[in-house]
Amino acid sequence: MTDLDGTWADESDWSAFDDESDGGEDGGAVPQPVLAVVGRPNVGKSTLVNRIIGRREAVVQDVPGVTRDRVAYDALWNGRKFTVVDTGGWEPDATGMMASVAAQAELAMATADAIVFVVDATVGATTTDEAAVKVLRRSKRPVLVVANKVDDERLMAEVAMLWSLGLGEPIPVSGLHGRGSGDMLDKILEALPESPRDTFGSNAGGPRRVALVGRPNVGKSSLLNRLTGEERSVVDAVAGTTVDPVDSLVELDDDLWRFVDTAGLRKRVNFASGAEYYASLRTKAAIESAEVAIVLLDASEPISEQDLRVLSMVVDSGRACVLAFNKWDLVDEDRRHAMVRELERGLVRVPWAERVNISALTGRAVRKLAPALRTALESWDTRVPTGRLNAWLNDLIQATPPPVRGGKQPKVLFATQASTRPPTFVLFTTGFLEAGYRRFIERKLREEFGFAGSPVRISVRVREKRAKK
């Protein structure tokens, strides 16, 4: 293999980076039965969910009402996989936002294959629990009564009193300490069918994963509800309604997408506390597990520091990116002129991102998201053949050589695309390339090969001189 100037390059320097394989992707997901975990507020549902799935994912805090949406997690027990749906606290006479939370819990009951009804054994059956039992009986699903917070034998008498609910034998469990969790999981497997009642249409490659991110109250949950055509996420005028990431399968332009609605990021993760801290961690994890992120911005307000922080998180994660300017129905002519200046200053890190002007409230241009997502993902997956890349780079460097550094002009010996997702290029040189010249190469790369909607990473490997024998 020859260098750009015709000399031979040492193959050992670059062969490890010229790997054409991109890593395996998940195949089509096998449908799994769904288990809904329901109960009144603060009975320990999220703690129990963490015990069932065997890891700390659901946000837990010792105050009622932390979980608000229905949130799905994958679980595995005795070789069988199933989906666990955590829900917000259910109350029969809830008003305001809590009424929406209760509606989410009821929808989870209606769509589940089996239900775990959690009761606080230290309190016993309340009038709210008895009202929930009436709803559960109408669901016509297998229901397991789990008496939570049974940390020792002294509460077994209270557990026996739960027979009065008429839903069968109560199962004593300590979600916090794990006491009785194995027996509970065995009974859950007995109640769950082998396959779910409702399945979505098959998708050979599996749904592409989309993270919906942005600062609080920009309309993420409203957009998800608009896309799904149902009240999938709790929406309220109070900022910070969403705490856990919420997964939804959305069909756009005959393609199935997996959208994840995330908590709005107020502070840096290091400065957040309590449920907000864990919500920030969940949002960060949701971005990293996604393939493309839709960053939602409020078009009716100036771009804020919080918006830029979210953008930086997406760029640093290396995910494809689509900028969705929401509330476009509130933008007048003066605001549009102001936005032009803001975009030039604030979005300097992502001039390559796809942009769509939408309104989640009215549905304006929401369908344009699908083409933007496809373009961004296509760029994210793009691989440039090594021969074509080096021929193009040779012409570029002859026209515009690297700047002289320390009295010497560095030479680019060879270039290769080390990986995709995101496209990552490695340049082997005889000297350091200035950051400005690397940005120049990236800009020219985009002009030649596209990469709209995807970050491009360029790294430089300086070839060390070998000692003469």
Image (spheres, helix red, strand yellow):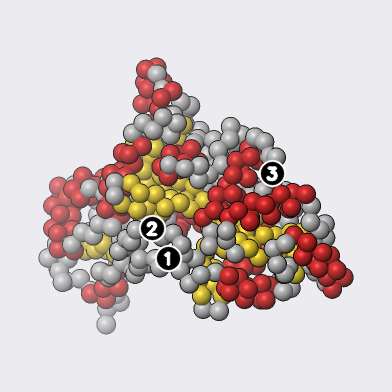
Circle 2 residue: 200
Tag in front: 1 or 3 = 3
Mark 2 and mark 1: Cα distance apart in space: 8 Å
Mark 1 and mark 3 lie on one chain; the one further toward the N terminus is 1
Q: Residues within 10 Å of mark 3 (few under 14, many from 20)?
A: some
Left or right, 123 with respect to 203, comes to: right
Q: Which residue is mark 3?
A: 92
Judging depth in this view, the residue of 204 and 434 nearest the camera is: 204
Residue situated in front as seen by the camera: 309 or 357: 357
Quadrant of residue 119 in the image? Answer: bottom right
Classify 10 Å Cα crowding around label 1: few (below 14), some (14-19), many (20 and above). some
Which residue type does callout 1 highlight? Answer: Pro
Check whether the beta carbons of the residues at disc 2 and disc 1 lie within 8 A of each other.
yes
Label 3 sits on what residue type? Pro
Q: Where is residue 136, by image quadrant?
A: bottom right
Q: Identify the residue shown where x is 38% and y is 58%.
A: 200
